[in-house]
Structures are given as structure tokens and as C-alpha cells.
């Protein structure tokens, strides 16, 4: 049975929303868990490296599974694992236990990212105009909601495990409701060719992946370090510690809802160049003017800057003429999502070597790289 495009779009949108809610729930309680385990910035950075380890472990299987088994089954299984891993993070009482749970959390993150974007590209093909950015906009809205829920939980001293369990229950229920509306896209038995675990993308796809990688380094750092930056550099108190994160998420969500229109009007290259410029300006503002209101404005620029890069890159990858959409999305999203997971621990190490404020200069350099690679890219 073929479902109406609108119904399929709603189902896939719900999966983006749940994925964003799970990740932002974790990000909103990093400070709580850091305090619980008495970790310094450098130690927290080392612990956060477990996330990209999980991603690396998922590389041989996630892309293959999406192409061979289908993104529908992979998405349902991966998002379920993602929610369970979130609960385990709240249960962690030792550093080794936290590291192990983060590895599983990272594995689930990558599998969800690849499968849900493959579903999104297939849904976009059913519409006459680009819609992929709107899916990512819902991911950002979920991040905003997750941050708000996290702030509420912190205010009422609710333990992370209780907080995370509630999110996981909602996520699992949503999967059950939406399952039958996903695209059936597994490899057909009559294809007659073996599905390789990894297919090397061509130069154009690698360039797209690098652009998204640089932007997602910034995005990952914003998620994990914005609250800590406001607490230790801006010296914000109380609820103001989450002001930068909230501002960034608001402008990221807003940017993604206008990204399709902007790209259609001005072109993909210009969209990516403007995005890199906005990120760079915002990050330099944070470093040069480490005060509450300029910092909030800085995160607004950062949120707007990173908003359109990933959806635009994924949409372009899905239209690749050299690889099947699923394989192209898997290759590019794997490269880019690695930046999302590597960014936070790198900031932790740089903060340990220098200062947290100086570490944000590295993020500004990533913004410049987005501009440079977008200028050279043939898009």
C-alpha cells in the first residue's frame, strides 16, 4: 500500500524530531553528569571522545545495512537503541561505565543519522520543491524543546535517569506509531549485485562531506559546550547559563525553515558561503566580547550559520549521479557526522591546553573552512 506523501512526510518528520530530542536531552545534562562524576574540562573532553569511537565502530555496518536491509528497519532499530543508550547514560556512576555507554550512544547516533536522512531524501523526491531543510528544522526545534525540558529538570533537581527514561518512552512510542508509513527501500533480491559495506564517494561528494564536517564540528561544540562556556567564560548565573544554547537553537531552527527558499533564490554555493560567514562572525564575537548580551548575539549568528549547511549538503548528495541516494547519503553523512562528534572532545582538549575561550577560536577557523571549501566546490 502506498501512503500519501503528506502522511509519509509527517512520519519521517517525527523521526527527526525524536532524534533531536534524544540528543538534546543528553546535551542539556552534560553539566550535571560532569559535576556528578567530578570531571574537569579536559577529562570531560576525553570522555566525550567515546562518541566518535561509537561512530567509527558503526561505519562498516550502518551504510551497508541501510542499502541492504533498508533505512526503514535500520531507523526503527537504531532509534530504539538510541533511546536505550540515553537511559544508560543517566545510570552511569563511573567514568568507565559512562565511556562504554557513550560508545553505544555514538553508534546509535550515526545509524539514526544515516537512515533518517535516507528516508528524508526519498520523501523529498515525492515533492516538486526542496523540503529536506524543513526536516532538519524539526530536529532543531526538538533540540530547543530538549534544552527547555533539561533546564526544567535541572531546576527541579530531577535525576538524569528519570529524565532520560521519559524521553526514551516517548521516542519508542512514536516509532511504533509511525513505522508503517516509512519508505520500503531495502535492496531487491533481483538486483543481482552484492552490497558492499562501504563505497568510496567521488571527489564532489567528499567535498560536500568536508563542508558539512567543518560546520558540524561547530554544531557539536555548540551543543556540548555552550552552557559550560556561559558558566565559566561569560560568568552567567542561574538560568542565564542556558541562554546561548537556547539562542543558537532558535536561530538554527528558524534558518532551516527558510534555507530551501534561500538556496532556490541565491544558489547552493552562496548559501554555504553565507552560512560559513555567519558562523565565523558569531564565534569571533564570543571570543572578542565575552559578555552576556554580545555572547547571546554571537550564538544567534552561530545558530543561523550552521542551520542550512547540513540539509543542503545532504540534499545535494541525494541527487548524486555517481551513487545511489542511500549510499551517497551514507558516505557524506558519515564524514559530516564525524565532525559533530569530534568537535566537543577537541574543544575539551584545547580548553585543557589553553583556555575554553581560546578553544573557540578553533571553531571560528572551521567557519572559515566552510567558506573556503564552498567557494572551491562545484555545486
Image (cartoon, helix red, strand yellow):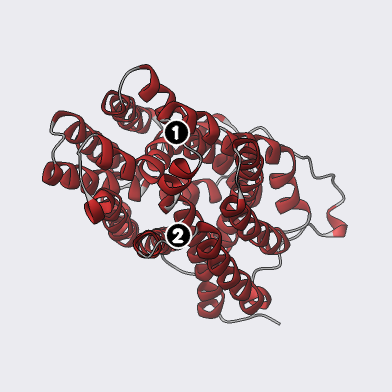
Q: Which of marks 2 and 1 precedes in the sequence? A: 2
- Up/down of 107 relative to 214, above or below: below
Q: Residue 132 carries which label?
A: 2
Name the one closer to the observer, 36 or 279: 36
Residue at 50% across, 68% down:
13
At x 24%, y 45%, the residue is 299
Instruction: Say left or right for 30 vs 54.
Output: left
- Residue at image mark 1: 343
| Any part of residue 272 in sight | no
Residue lying at 14% horizontally and 44% vertically, measured from the top left: 292
Q: Position of residue 253 (x, y in %)?
A: 33, 59
Residue 341 position within the rendered picture, expressed as x and y whole percent measured from the top left: 51, 38
Q: Which one is in front in this view, the residue at disc 1 or the one at disc 2?
A: 1
- Name the element at disc 1: helix
State whether residue 357 appears in this view: yes
CA–CA distance between discs 1 and 2? Answer: 24 Å
The N terminus appears in which quarter of the rendering?
bottom right
| Residue sticking out furthest to the top | 353
Q: In which quarter of the image is the C terminus?
A: top left
Instruction: Tell me if mark 2 has few (under 14), some (14-19) or many (20+) residues whose alpha carbon lies within 10 angstroms of its own.
Output: many
> Residue 42: x and y, percent?
44, 26
Above or below, 197 against 162 in this view is above
- Decide if residue 304 is on the left or right side of residue 172: left
The residue nearer to you, when weighing 168 against 318, is 168
Tag 2's secondary structure?
A: helix
Depth check, front residue: 311 or 270: 311
Could you tell me which residue is drawn at 30 percent across and 29 percent down?
360
Graded by Cα atoms within 10 Å as few (under 14), some (14 to 19) or many (20 or more), the crowding at tag 1 reads many
Amino acid at each position: 500500500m502506498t501512503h500519501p506523501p503528506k502522511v509519509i512526510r509527517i512520519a519521517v518528520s517525527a523521526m527527526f524530531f525524536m532524534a533531536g530530542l534524544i540528543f538534546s536531552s543528553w546535551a542539556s545534562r552534560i553539566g550535571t553528569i560532569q559535576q556528578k562524576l567530578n570531571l574537569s574540562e579536559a577529562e570531560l573532553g576525553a570522555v566525550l571522545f567515546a562518541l566518535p569511537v561509537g561512530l567509527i565502530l558503526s561505519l562498516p555496518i550502518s551504510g551497508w545495512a541501510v542499502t541492504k536491509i533498508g533505512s526503514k528497519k535500520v531507523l526503527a532499530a537504531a532509534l530504539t537503541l538510541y533511546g536505550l543508550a540515553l537511559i544508560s547514560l543517566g545510570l552511569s556512576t563511573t567514568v568507565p561505565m559512562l565511556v562504554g555507554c557513550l560508545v553505544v550512544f555514538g553508534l546509535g547516533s550515526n545509524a539514526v543519522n544515516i537512515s533518517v536522512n535516507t528516508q528524508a531524501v526519498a520523501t523529498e523526491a515525492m515533492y516538486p520543491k526542496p523540503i529536506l531543510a524543513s526536516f532538519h528544522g524539526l530536529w532543531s526545534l526538538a533540540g530547543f524543546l530538549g534544552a527547555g525540558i533539561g533546564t526544567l529538570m535541572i531546576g527541579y533537581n530531577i535525576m538524569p535517569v528519570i529524565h532520560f527514561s521519559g524521553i526514551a518512552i516517548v521516542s519508542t512510542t512514536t516509532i511504533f506509531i509511525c513505522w508503517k508509513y516509512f519508505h520500503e527501500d531495502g535492496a531487491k533480491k533481483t538486483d543481482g549485485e552484492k552490497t558492499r559495506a562501504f563505497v568510496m564517494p567521488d571527489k564532489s561528494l567528499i567535498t560536500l562531506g568536508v563542508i558539512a564536517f567543518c560546520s558540524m564540528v561547530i554544531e557539536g561544540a555548540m551543543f556540548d559546550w555552550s552552557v559550560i562556556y556561559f558558566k565559566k567564560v561569560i560568568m552567567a548565573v542561574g538560568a542565564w547559563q542556558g541562554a546561548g544554547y537556547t539562542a543558537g537553537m532558535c536561530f538554527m531552527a528558524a534558518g532551516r525553515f527558510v534555507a530551501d527558499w534561500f538556496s532556490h533564490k541565491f544558489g547552493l554555493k552562496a548559501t554555504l558561503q553565507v552560512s560559513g560567514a555567519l558562523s565565523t562572525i558569531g564565534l569571533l564575537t564570543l571570543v572578542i566580547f565575552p559578555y552576556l548580551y554580545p555572547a547571546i548575539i554571537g550564538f544567534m549568528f552561530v545558530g543561523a550559520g550552521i542551520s542550512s549547511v547540513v540539509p543542503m549538503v545532504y540534499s545535494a548528495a541525494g541527487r548524486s549521479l555517481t551513487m545511489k541516494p542511500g549510499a551517497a547519503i551514507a558516505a557524506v553523512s558519515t564524514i559530516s557526522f564525524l565532525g559533530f562528534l569530534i568537535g566537543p572532545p577537541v574543544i575539551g582538549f584545547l580548553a585543557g591546553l589553553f583556555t575554553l575561550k581560546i578553544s573557540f577560536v578553533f571553531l571560528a577557523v572551521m567557519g572559515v573552512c566552510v567558506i573556503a571549501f564552498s567557494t572551491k566546490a562545484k555545486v
